[in-house]
Image (cartoon, rainbow, N blue to C red):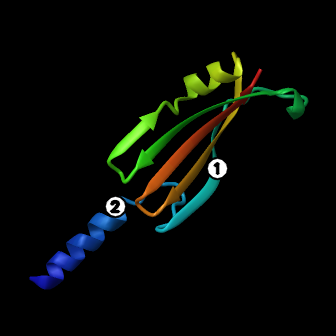
Amino acid sequence: MKKIFVILGLVFMLSTIPANAMGLFYTDATYPVTATGNKVQDLSTLKKGTANTNNILFLVEVGDASIDTAAKNGGIKKISYIDIQEKSVFIFWRGIKITVYGE
């Protein structure tokens, strides 16, 4: 019986692992979400907009980290690509920042 609970616990833990990289105690990672295929001649001419959200103790999460909000914050009408930056410290704090680049 004890083995069944251990196996079920492991299956649950492995099934809840997010697709992106996330450290158990500390995370500071940036990764791409999508690219739209818009041709960009000079990357330095792109506008940049950000939006973020913060989570405390997995109890309270505040903010608006939507792509739409990030695009509006940067005055972007045509999105070229999107990055996500994720930071966390164990269960105490987690922050997500969406960065949208475009014209």
- The residue nearer to you, when weighing 97 against 13, is 97
Mark 2 — residue? 15
Q: Splitting the image into 4 quarters, where does residue 96 fall?
A: top right
> Is residue 82 or residue 27 the one in the foreground?
27
Q: Quadrant of residue 90?
A: bottom left
Give the residue displayed 28% in from the left and 68% down from the top: 11
Left or right for 48, reference 7: right
Whole-percent x, y for residue 13 in the image: 32, 66
Quadrant of the snapshot with the C terminus? top right
Q: Of label 2 and label 1, which has the lower sequence position?
A: 2
Identify the amino acid type marked 1.
Answer: Tyr
- Say which element carries label 1: strand
Mark 2 element type: helix
Q: Could you tell me residue 61's position as x and y percent?
A: 40, 41
Left/right placement of residue 19 relative to residue 30 reads left
Residue at 57% from the left image edge and 50% from the top image edge = 86
Distance (Cα) linking label 2 and label 1 = 21 Å
**Residue 31: which disc?**
1
